[in-house]
Image (tube, grey):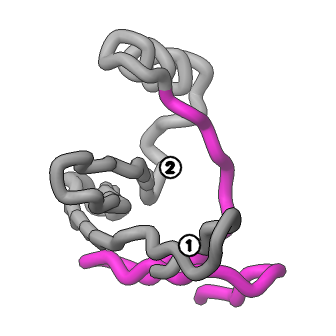
Amino acid sequence: SHSSPDLPGVWYWGQNAVCDSGGYVQQLGRTWEQSNYTLWNLQERNWLDRKTRVIFIEFTQYFQNVDLYSVVTLLVEFPFTGGSYTTIDVKPFSLLRLSTGVDFLLV
């Protein structure tokens, strides 16, 4: 059975389950080597093991030539039966200036 999260937040619909916004956060490095080391370290310290059910990798990309941002969420699910399922969600958006001197984020 699943219970609702303690705080209202974002729900993610994967291929195998629905995940709430609870859990732990680990920032990855700015380079492939730093990120790879961080993931290796999590696995070595048993933060990523056979009981891990889902990993979210989220980042924002800016495309200067079209003045457009994209928020990318990569979801990797690990069902208890083994294997993995991946889901990717890309949400492009632009920042619109609504007043002089202050910018607001519109998604």
Residue 77 in sight from this viewpoint = no
Residue 105's spot in the image, x, y percent?
Answer: 56, 72
Q: Dot 1 corresponds to which residue?
A: 105
Residue at 57% in and 81% down = 98
Residue at 43% in and 22% down = 30
Q: Quadrant of residue 69?
A: bottom left
Decide if residue 31 is on the left or right side of residue 12. left
Decide if residue 43 is on the left or right side of residue 27. left
Secondary structure under the numbered disc 1 in the rendered image: loop
Q: Answer above or below: position of 43 versus 64.
A: above
N-term mark: 1 or 2: 2
C-alpha span from label 1 to label 2:
37 Å
Residue 70 in sight from this viewpoint = yes
Amino acid at dot 1: Leu
Residue 11's spot in the image, x, y percent?
Answer: 53, 82
Residue 80's spot in the image, x, y percent?
Answer: 36, 61
**Magenta residue span:** 1-28
Q: Dot 2 corresponds to which residue?
A: 51
